[in-house]
């Protein structure tokens, strides 16, 4: 029996969810083009701009992907651009569960005992 890839097994990439979520990827492609970077670089840059207490942890097995990820450090975003990127993918409109197995919900960030973000 063949092993399913993450894309094949993830709820957000299956059936009608895939078709609905393709719209968001297209939006990110357009924004990335506007910023002269890849969609992955734009996403990583957006995370890097979320504050000093937030850090992306991208995984890769290929040097070319590592180089691409490092390229996200060159993408500088203004406050207005951060709002534009956030608005491009309204979280309540993303179709499908973010977890492959719903039993992992108990271990998600929603149940973490994380202190509130300090005001500047």
Image (cartoon, helix red, strand yellow):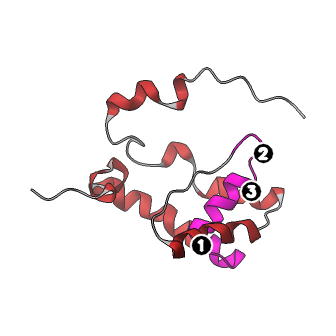
Residue 17 higher or lower than 54, as above or below: below
Q: Which residue is mark 2?
A: 51
Nearer-the-camera pick, 118 or 53 = 53
Write the start and end of the magenta stretch as one range.
Answer: 30-54
Q: Position of residue 95 (x, y in %)?
A: 41, 48
Q: Quadrant of residue 74?
A: bottom right
Q: Are marks 2 and 3 in contact (CB under 8 Å)?
A: no
Q: Position of residue 39 (x, y in %)?
A: 57, 69
Residue neighbourhood size for the residue with mark 2, other residues' Cα within 10 Å, grouped as few (<14), some (14–19), many (≥20)? few
Q: Earlier in the sequence, mark 1 or mark 3?
A: 1
User: Can you tell which of label 1 and label 3 is closer to the viewer?
Assistant: 1
Q: Which residue is mark 3?
A: 82
Q: Quadrant of residue 81?
A: bottom right
Q: Position of residue 44 (x, y in %)?
A: 64, 59
Q: Are marks 2 and 1 in contact (CB under 8 Å)?
A: no
Q: CA distance from mark 2 to mark 3?
A: 12 Å
Q: CA distance from mark 2 to mark 1?
A: 22 Å
Nearer-the-camera pick, 91 or 100 = 100
Nearer-the-camera pick, 85 or 3 = 3
């Amino acid at each position: 029996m063949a092993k399913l890839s993450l894309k094949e097994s993830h709820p957000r990439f299956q059936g009608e969810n895939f078709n609905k979520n393709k719209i968001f990827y297209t939006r990110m492609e357009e924004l990335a083009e506007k910023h002269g970077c890849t969609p992955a670089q734009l996403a990583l840059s957006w995370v890097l701009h979320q504050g000093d207490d937030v850090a992306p942890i991208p995984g890769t097995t290929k040097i070319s992907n590592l180089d691409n990820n490092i390229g996200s450090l060159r993408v500088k975003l203004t406050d207005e651009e951060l709002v534009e990127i956030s608005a491009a993918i309204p979280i309540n409109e993303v179709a499908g569960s973010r977890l492959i197995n719903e039993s992992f919900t108990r271990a998600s960030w929603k149940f973490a005992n994380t202190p509130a973000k300090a005001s500047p």
